[in-house]
Image (cartoon, rainbow, N blue to C red):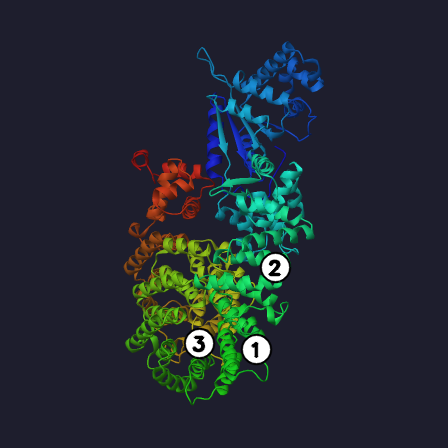
Amino acid sequence: MAQTFGTPLIGRDEEVARLSRVLERARAGEARAVLVAGDAGVGKTRMLTEIAGRAARSGVTVLTGHCVDLGDVGLPYLPFTEVLGAVAADERLAPVLAAHPEAERMLGGAPDAVRDVGGRLRLFEGTAALFADLSDAAPVLLVLEDLHWADQSSRDLLRFLLSRGVLQPATGGTAGHRLAVLASYRADDLHRRHPLRPLLAELVRLPAVERLELRPLADAEVARLVRSVEDRPLPDATVRRIVERAEGNAFYAEELVAATGSEGGGVPSGLADVLLIRVEQLSDTAQQVLRTAAVAGRRVEHDLLRDAVGLPDDALESALREAVGHQLLVAGERDTYSFRHALAREAVYGDLLPGERARLHGAFARLLAGRGPAADTAAERAHHYRESHDPAAALAASLEAAGHAQRVGAPAEELRHLEAALDLWEAVPAAERPAGDVVDRVTLMLRASAAAAHAGESHRAVSLTRAALAGVGQDADSELAARVRYTLAGNLIGVDSLRAAYAYSSEALEMIPAEPPSPTWVWAAATHVLAARQVGDDDTALRVGRRALAVAERLRVTDAQADLLVSLANLEGDGRRSPEGRARLTEARELARRAGNAPVELRALYNLAVGAYESGELEESLPWLAEGLDRARRAGLSSSPYPMEMRYLHLVVLYTLGRWDACVEAAEADAAVLPASGGYTVAPALHVALARGELDRAADRARALLDGPFDWMATLAAGIALTDAAALRGDAEAAVAQVRTTVDALTDVSGTGPDVAVRLAALALAAVADAAVEKRLTGDEDAASRWAGTARELADLARERALRGVTGRPQGPEGMAWLARAEAEEARAVTGPDPAVWEKAVTAFAYGDAYERARCRLRYAEALLVAERREEAAGEARAVRETAVRLGAGPLLDRVDALVRRGRLGEGAGAPGRASVLTAREGDVLRLLALGRSNRQIGEELFISGKTASVHVSNILAKLGAGSRTEAVAIAYREGLITPGAVAAG
């Protein structure tokens, strides 16, 4: 086939396997045909091109014919004349064609000469005989594309070939024809009276003909396609939006990627034209109904559509039948109709005239209002009133919708409705604004900023609060002015603008007198405690915090009391790692729960989890995280800051404990629901990818975290991944540069560096020490000395941050373990490998980090080998190998096996073959691969998601060095990784 594609074939493993089996049966003399159905753009041509390419490379003769839309006046036998033209042009095949003059006449205008029944029969029989003879010379794959445009003559010839011609089974013990026919058509073009429908119904009843429906791609598959189409990394939010709009259609996804960054955000013009062509084939009445339905939205109730369009029932039903028949609308439950694809609805809506659009929106608004003020229609009414240019009614409905969203725990939707209300506020006269809780624009902006913060839109929360501050006049109520300032301070902490947060919290506290005590002063003080701690002013934080806690207890402001207890638990004594600190945090959680303040309760739960983690009690942190994430879900706050950090910590704990498959599965589940600002939370899964050798993919995803406004956690997560990736590549200069960049970005306004600097320094030191050792071995003492100096600099950074963390106290077991590793790498760079310091590092990581302990043990084994302690070195190598096999850490396994070979550490520590590199779960997946299972089927049988099954399959291919699933199974049988008996038992 002439057509080629620059993007990989994604998400069609099961379909390709099925067509490959058909082709193999045809090669063996069992002629078969497959009718490939699918919507326009779903990927039929791409898949057939893949099959044709594979067939051609294996020696199959591939012949392709295309049907073309020529309206009512089609060219007879068009796809077959294209096929015969290719045969005539091929010097190997032309003699076979010459032996069949009846078929050859088709190229010279024979259709005009064979209108009588006898002539047509000779033509059909001659064509069948031609394909039979071609298949005797070599297996033949006949591909016919776009049968929905086939002319009547082509349909008749295809019917003959499949029912009476080349697909008929052989008789008398002779071999059948080595022919496979793959014919595609658009399922969404087959309306009830389409002439292809009766032929398809007839053909699928034939024993040698089967039907294959190409389903829409799964969301994860569309995401992979999007990332493969675009050279530059796209932000996760952009990818999610494209996936959502494409709805599994590969062509739509590629068009939307191509339009990324263009103005408007609607349907790309070229795609809109494609979609509207089908609409324009309908009658005027049916088009009117579609335009009205497009204004209603993706789905519309029959009664509402009837009242809006204003047609008699019989005319409406006829139009709806036409739209459904052409598969533009789909009938649903409870008398509803939906557009078959959201982009079709967008294209129809975008084609409306402005006045027509406003008129129809007004009609829907009035119809919905006539049904009563139901909360579930408020959002619809607000939208329709807004688009029909009725600002007063739109404002009232927007506020109603925002209240409903708040009650059901949907902060993102609440924010959207509140921002719509803010846009409308000035356009509505004061007398026409709704009465109630919203008394002015400033109060409305504060409410919107809270919704933004709860939805994880931290920068938007800051913008809204700054706008509220700008709207506070000189004569404003002092409590309102203070509330705006301490709210702004809290939001600024969320985007790491710490000095500004401290300034505003100071202003807020000064605006409200401490006496008589008031809840507003308590909250202003609680915010000031947070801000003071962030800028390193712990004395002020302690002083104000203790006083505010006493006032909160006296006034019984329970949730503020809980918030202050959390702050003081971190400030006093040994902080949240201590029993005293955890007791205060537990008390704070209970107080916040009784007060019904979910954000403060979540803050307490987060600190309890972090305190356990920092103490090296990883398992103990998991129940706190589970409770916190469940509470956030029930409160509709899953995207707010503390739950986002809980997601991140949850994956960190799973990764550290060596539960890597669970870490990857949880990251995939989280990625599907995260807001754009939460991309950093899945970063621990990147550490798994790095450890399993996927350096480029992990580094690309890490760099994508740095897109957009500065985010402290995203910078931290990306810095760890990028530093480790550079170190694993052996690029010491890049690793050191990444450490410096990340530490500079994360250093706070008081000049205090981040605790993570210890880990960053240790990771980079691995590459620095390698560089120093290499230069020393080659005799370049000057370069070795320079790298040794860099090692000392990084080790000093690690010591400084480990011994005095951001709290002013030494870090916990994790920080100390990374310091031990940093100092061991420093020694290797400066003086050479020292078993004593590496033994210390191995012991330090015994708190729970299996992978880092194994990496240290590998270095320890190297040092023992240099010290001629071979038996101990072999024991450490065996321990490393066991961990690497269990985790599926292929690169680490390769390194320890190389050390065993170089050091001749004996068979006991050697590599027993590739079987042990597969995890137990990958062994289960491999056995199901041998049974021909698809990713979805594997997922169902192993109770995992299809996406996770795909990850396991990719890992198996990489570990076995296989280029395909079939090759992986062949290698597995050859090397004894699976046996026929084991597969049958599975």
Residue type pointed to by label 1:
Leu
- Which of discs 3 and 2 lies nearer the camera? The answer is 2
Please tell me whether residue 556 is drawn above or below residue 281 in the rendered image.
below
Residue type pointed to by label 3:
Asp
Instruction: State the image coordinates of residue 254 (x, y, percent, origin top left).
Output: 59, 46
Instruction: State the image coordinates of residue 472 (x, y, percent, origin top left).
Output: 57, 79
Residue occupying image coordinates x 44% and y 39%: 965
Q: Nearer the viewer, residue 671 or 7?
A: 671
Task: Look at the image and tell me whether residue 706 can be seen.
Answer: no
Instruction: State the image coordinates of residue 774 (x, y, percent, origin top left).
Output: 47, 63
Disc 2 crowd, CA 10 A, few/some/many (<14, 14-19, 20+): many
Residue occupying image coordinates x 56% and y 67%: 709
Q: In the structure shown, which secondary structural element does the residue marked by tag 2 occupy?
A: helix
Q: In the structure shown, which secondary structural element does the residue marked by tag 3 occupy?
A: helix
Q: Find residue 392 and name its label.
A: none
Q: Find residue 469 and name its label.
A: 1
Q: Nearer the viewer, residue 499 or 224?
A: 499
What residue does disc 2 label? 386
Which of the image's four quarters has the C terminus?
top left
What residue does disc 3 label? 796
Q: CA distance from mark 3 to mark 1?
A: 44 Å
Q: Earlier in the sequence, mark 3 or mark 2?
A: 2
